Image (spheres, rainbow, N blue to C red):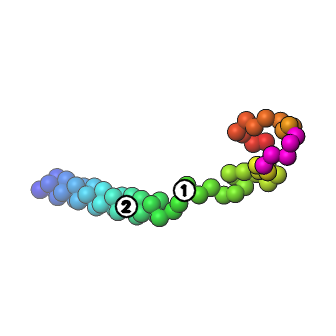
C-alpha cells in the first residue's frame, strides 16, 4: 500500500511540474511575441560615422564589407 501511495504521489508531482513548466513556457512565448526583434538599435545597425551619405564624387576610402569596423 505504501508503494502505491508513493507512486501516486510521484506521478502527481511530475504532472504538477510539467504543468508549471508548460505555463512558464507559454508566458515566455507571449513575452517574445510582444517584443519586436526586427527593430535593431541604431548603434548596432550602423555605427556612428559609418552611415551612407550619398554620392560626393569621391572614391570611398575603403570598401564596405558588411562588418564593423
Does the segment drawn in magenta span residue 22? Answer: no
Q: Which residue is mark 1?
A: 37
Q: Is residue 52 above or below residue 61?
A: below
Between 51 and 5, which is closer to the camera in this rendering?
A: 51
Where residue 43 sits in the image (x, y, percent)? Answer: 72, 55
Observer-nearest residue: 17 or 58?
58
The percent position of residue 9, horizontal first and vertical second, equals: 22, 59
Q: Residue at x 79, y 51 (%)?
A: 53
Position of the C terminus, as image quadrant, is top right
Q: Badge 1: how crowded within 10 Å, few (<14), some, or many (20+)?
A: few
Instruction: Report the quarter where the N terminus lies.
Output: bottom left
- Gap between marks 1 and 2, in whole Å? 18 Å
User: In the figure, 24 relative to 58: above or below?
Assistant: below
Give the residue displayed 28% in from the left and 55% down from the top: 14
Left or right, residue 49 beside residue 65? right
- Residue 49 at what x, y percent from top left? 82, 52
Q: Is residue 55 magenta?
A: yes
Which percent across, then down, holds residue 27? 40, 64
Residue that lies at the very extreme toward the front in this rendered image: 57
- What secondary structure is the magenta-colored segment mainly? loop
- Please report the bounds of the magenta region as a residue range: 54-58
User: For this view, does 6 lie left or right of residue 67?
Assistant: left
Q: What label does residue 60 carry, if any?
A: none
Q: Nearer the viewer, residue 51 or 40?
A: 51
Please tell me which residue lies in front, 31 or 53.
53
Q: Is residue 6 visible?
A: no
Q: Secondary structure at mark 2?
A: helix
Q: Residues within 10 Å of mark 2 (few under 14, many from 20)?
A: few
Tell me whether circle 1 and circle 2 mark residues in contact (CB < 8 Å): no
Given this view, does label 1 or label 2 mark the residue nearer the observer?
1
Mark 1 or mark 2, which has the lower sequence index?
A: 2
Please name the residue that numbered disc 2 is placed on. 26
Amino acid at each position: 500500500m505504501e508503494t502505491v501511495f508513493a507512486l501516486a504521489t510521484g506521478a502527481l508531482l511530475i504532472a504538477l511540474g510539467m504543468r508549471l513548466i508548460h505555463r512558464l513556457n507559454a508566458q515566455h512565448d507571449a513575452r517574445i511575441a510582444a517584443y519586436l526583434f526586427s527593430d535593431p538599435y541604431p548603434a548596432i545597425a550602423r555605427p556612428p560615422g559609418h552611415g551612407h551619405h550619398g554620392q560626393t564624387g569621391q572614391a570611398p576610402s575603403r570598401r564596405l564589407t558588411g562588418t564593423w569596423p
